[in-house]
Image (cartoon, rainbow, N blue to C red):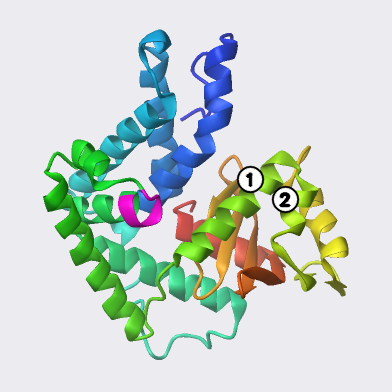
């Protein structure tokens, strides 16, 4: 599907597309864990918005969240009725004989596959309630209007999903994305999108280290690392940035269209980024592409 604004000649609509598309894409991906499906859902949500009188919508972002979430819920229910091989990425993502997780590519591969397998075990309503409330902090009263159940029922659905995730986290098989990681990743992405050097610097430890797998050497210090990050992730390059939890680190995927450019891993200590690891080689990009469903 062509990922462009449905009303390119309408400045007001284009502004809404630019302001909200990335967040809707992030929401759809976290629910579906399949990037092409997430893109299609977001495109359809904006297409529906394009057919709606914007004057009658008080809060376009809230409107988009409801429509995007309901479209995702429909897809999740359809998957339950018609499971596809595309999501059955491995027979056992928790295979004890898997490659050494100290290998960065293997880590991304193993955790991503585990995340797919685990969330597929949740019912569509459990998954939707959990992602909307626990990940995106929407109140259960709003979640209820999307899921089509009472707020109390959605609270119970999210609780069941949370217990399942925590049980896997306690076993060491599936580290759960923390609220702190979510907050840091959002601020990191927003700073990159806006080319906000100061906003990025406040997220970095003064002694942060940055390295990549395609360039030699290690950058040391926030004043050196931050401009390098913006050079590749900020304007004018401006790739699409997507949050992908990877073990106990934050993963930021940079994409151009449906092509993965890099995976940036952020290590957090005491609320600050202490290490930035940019993986842009063919191996990591292929693994991330597979994890996103871009094969």
Q: Is residue 76 above or below residue 276?
A: above
Question: Where does the image place residue 222, in percent across and percent down from the top left?
Answer: 82, 65
In the rendered image, which quarter is residue 266 located in?
A: bottom right
The residue at the point 55 percent across, 13 percent down is 12
Q: Is residue 215 above or below residue 194?
A: below
The residue at the point 31 percent across, 67 percent down is 117
In the rendered image, which quarter is residue 88 located in?
A: bottom left
Q: Give the residues in magenta.
A: 133-137
Q: Is residue 59 visible?
A: yes
SS state under label 1: helix
Q: Is residue 23 above or below residue 249?
A: above
Left or right relative to 218: residue 293: left
Question: Where does the image place residue 160, in percent across and percent down from the top left?
Answer: 18, 65
Q: What secondary structure is the magenta-colored segment mainly?
A: helix
Q: Is residue 254 visible?
A: no
Quick one: 3 or 277, which is closer to the camera? 277
SS state under label 2: helix
Left or right relative to 126: residue 289: right
Cβ atoms under marks 2 and 1 closer than 8 Å: yes
- The residue wearing badge 2 is 199
The residue at the point 82 percent across, 63 percent down is 225
The residue at the point 33 percent across, 86 percent down is 171
Question: Where does the image place residue 60, in percent across and percent down from the top left?
Answer: 42, 24
Count the labels in the image.
2
Left or right relative to 61: residue 280: right
- The residue wearing badge 1 is 190
């Amino acid at each position: 599907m062509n990922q462009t604004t449905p009303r390119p000649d309408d400045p007001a609509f284009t502004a809404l597309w630019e302001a909200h598309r990335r967040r809707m894409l992030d929401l759809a991906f976290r629910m579906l864990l399949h990037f092409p499906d997430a893109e299609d859902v977001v495109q359809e949500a904006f297409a529906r918005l394009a057919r709606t009188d914007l004057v009658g919508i008080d809060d376009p972002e809230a409107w988009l969240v409801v429509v995007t979430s309901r479209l995702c819920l429909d897809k999740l229910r359809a998957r339950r009725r018609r499971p596809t091989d595309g999501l059955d990425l491995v027979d056992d993502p928790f295979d004890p004989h898997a490659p050494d997780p100290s290998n960065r590519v293997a880590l991304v591969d193993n955790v991503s596959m585990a995340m797919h397998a685990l969330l597929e075990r949740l019912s569509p309503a459990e998954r939707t309630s959990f992602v909307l409330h626990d990940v995106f902090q929407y109140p259960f009263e709003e979640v209820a209007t999307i899921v089509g159940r009472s707020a109390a029922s959605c609270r119970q659905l999210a609780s069941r999903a949370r217990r399942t995730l925590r049980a896997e986290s306690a076993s060491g098989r599936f580290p759960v994305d923390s609220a702190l990681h979510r907050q840091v990743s959002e601020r990191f992405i927003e700073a990159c999108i806006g080319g906000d050097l100061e906003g990025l610097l406040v997220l970095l430890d003064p002694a942060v280290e940055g390295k990549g797998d395609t360039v030699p050497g290690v950058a040391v210090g926030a004043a050196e690392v931050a401009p390098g990050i913006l050079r590749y992730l900020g304007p004018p390059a401006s790739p699409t940035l997507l949050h992908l939890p990877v073990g106990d680190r934050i993963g930021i995927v940079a994409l151009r269209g449906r092509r993965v450019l890099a995976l940036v891993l952020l290590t957090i200590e005491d609320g600050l980024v202490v290490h930035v690891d940019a993986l842009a080689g063919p191996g990591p990009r292929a693994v991330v592409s597979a994890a996103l469903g871009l094969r």
